[in-house]
Amino acid sequence: MTTDPVLLEERPSDGVVVVRLHRPEVLNALNLVLRQALADAFTRLEADPAVRVIVLAGSARAFCAGADLNEYVDATPAGVIERRMGPLWGAVRRCPQPVIAAVRGHALGGGCELAMHADLVIAGEGARFGQPEVLIGLMPGGGATQRLTRAVGKFRAMQILLTGAPFKADAALAMGLASEVVADDEVEPRALALAAQLAAGPQQALQFIKEAVIEGMNLPLDQGLQFERKSFQLLFASADKTEGIRARLEKRTAVYR
């Protein structure tokens, strides 16, 4: 059995790659080796023009159960700083391709934060989300205080962060932290089907949409609208725009290149 902490399952026929966390013995807990492997995988895939959509997955029992506490129990502030976690999270955050998180089982702590780095979250009915860091005297360090608040609002975020209580997939869907909830055994098939659908679409438009949404979250409304307008205008130089409009007028399926 492979000991690689991250497995890449490439599907050249449709431009989809599955990035799978692979530390099943510890519910895919994030140690430094796994974090680096994940960053390396996303850095490579970002630069590969054949990769159109990425599905981020774990195992049936756990998407990711959070940080590996064995690395934290005796850690000091200086030691944590030396880990340089920012660039490792950043490799996932800056990925231009659409990223779909296929969440089964536990998505806790850093695992919940990792799911929030995706653009779409397909959750199984048995998935459990949460930010339990406060229960061990810590706080989130992978973006939850910021991303979670933007996703679900201040008061829900405060309840999740201050109590550390886990919540189920249907609650995640209701508060806007999941895109869809399906049966546990349908999570990856649904994520792959959605990935194939996006991979067949106009890639520049998809990437511009992702970029505008993420940039707009950090900008005042007027600046976000200006960013959107410029991106919209630039798409008129793309062959996909012409193909998409002609296909609609001719009542046929567009073939994007």
Image (cartoon, rainbow, N blue to C red):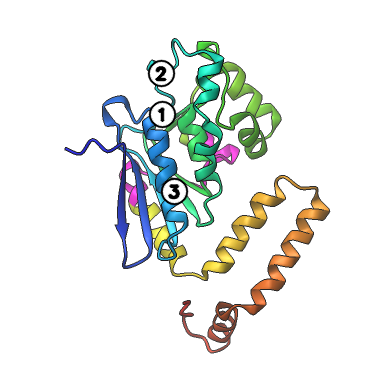
How many dots with numbers?
3
The residue where tag 1 is placed is: 32
Q: Secondary structure at mark 1?
A: helix
In the visual, does 228 lie left or right of 182? right
The residue where tag 3 is placed is: 42
Q: Amino acid at mark 2?
A: Glu
Magenta-drawn segment: 171-188
The image shows residue 181, relative to residue 140, as above or below, that is: below
Disc ID at residue 71: 2
- Residue lying at 39% horizontally and 27% vertically, measured from the top left: 31
The answer to whether the residue labelled 1 contacts the one labelled 3, judged by CB atoms less than 8 Å apart, is no
In the visual, does 187 lie left or right of 137? left
Relative to the observer, which residue lies in front, 118 or 82?
A: 82
Q: Amino acid at mark 3?
A: Phe
Relative to the observer, which residue lies in front, 228 or 81?
A: 81
How far is disc 1 from disc 3 in space, using C-alphas?
A: 15 Å
The answer to whether the residue labelled 1 contacts the one labelled 2, judged by CB atoms less than 8 Å apart, is yes
Percent x, y of residue 61 = 31, 32
Q: Secondary structure at mark 3?
A: helix
- Residue lying at 40% horizontally and 63% vertically, measured from the top left: 196
Relative to the observer, which residue lies in front, 123 or 89?
A: 89
How far is disc 1 from disc 2 in space, using C-alphas?
A: 8 Å
Local packing at callout 3 (Cα closer than 10 Å; few below 14, some 14-19, many 20+) is many
Local packing at callout 1 (Cα closer than 10 Å; few below 14, some 14-19, many 20+) is some
Which circle's residue, 2 or 3, is located before the other in the chain?
Answer: 3
Q: Quadrant of residue 162?
A: top right
Percent x, y of residue 25 = 26, 26
Which circle's residue, 1 or 3, is located before the other in the chain?
Answer: 1
Local packing at callout 2 (Cα closer than 10 Å; few below 14, some 14-19, many 20+) is few
